[in-house]
Amino acid sequence: MALTAIVIVAAVLTALYRLLVLSGGLRRANRPEVSLPSLHGPDEYKLEYIKAMLELVREDIRHVLLRVTAALAVTALFITQVPYDRLIGLPLWTRVILCLGLASIALSGGLYFRYVRSLHITQMRMTRCIPTLDVYRTRALWAGPSGVWQRHKTSYRSGTLLFAASAILLGTVVFYLFLARPKLGH
């Protein structure tokens, strides 16, 4: 039974990895480099550019914080709302999948939080560019070779992969709990 669970989990993770590769999430080598437009112009345009970049960072933070909240909520829901006696009575393969799912979603939330923290630091650095209207530094902080995405995309992508894996794993347990209706703990 445990071997079956491990094989199922490996197949699910392999499928998620392939999905991520096919969607272009991990493929970057064949993409041509895009030249960015010039940032020359009046000071008003530079200020608006920096403000727009800051708003983009804020939107990204809000978006990722929703995922952090969802990860924490699902973990708390499983821990507090599913009776412990019912979980202990599950077959071994189901408990293994449950533990892997909870670990995946907790790690996903941690990776997303790490990414949000880096976005917050980048937002503070971008804000420091306002007095000097340094649009080149602002763009470099966001999209440059050592920008926030280039340095922290692994946290975001890994969080996304683990979030999807946990949805499948925990969904399998919920599916079993509702449809199999095992006689547990009686």
Image (tube, rainbow, N blue to C red):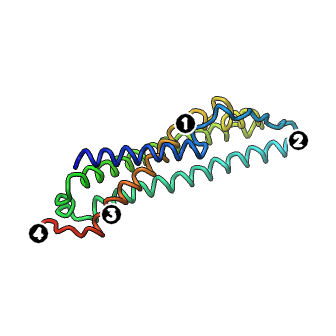
Residue 10 point in image, percent of width and height: 37, 43
> Mark 4 vs mark 1: which is more N-terminal?
1
Q: Measure the alpha-carbon separation of dots 4 and 3.
A: 20 Å
Q: Are marks 4 and 3 in contact (CB under 8 Å)?
A: no
Q: Amino acid at mark 4?
A: His
- What's the residue at 70%, 35% (across, down)? 31
Residue 37 point in image, percent of width and height: 82, 38
Q: Measure the alpha-carbon separation of dots 4 and 1.
A: 49 Å
Q: Which residue is mark 3?
A: 174
Is 134 rendered above or below residue 182?
Answer: above
- Front tag of 3 and 1: 3
- Front tag of 4 and 1: 4
Q: Amino acid at mark 1?
A: His
Residue 64 point in image, percent of width and height: 53, 51
- Front tag of 4 and 2: 4
Q: Measure the alpha-carbon separation of dots 3 and 1.
A: 33 Å
Q: Secondary structure at mark 1?
A: helix
> Mark 3 vs mark 1: which is more N-terminal?
1
Q: Which mark is residue 186?
A: 4
Q: Which mark is residue 42?
A: 2
Which residue extends farthest right? 42
Q: Secondary structure at mark 2?
A: loop
- Front tag of 2 and 3: 3
Callout 3 crowding tier (Cα within 10 Å): few <14, some 14–19, many ≥20: some
The reply to whether residue 6 is visible in this rendering is yes
> Mark 2 vs mark 3: which is more N-terminal?
2
Q: Are marks 4 and 1 in contact (CB under 8 Å)?
A: no
Q: Secondary structure at mark 3?
A: helix
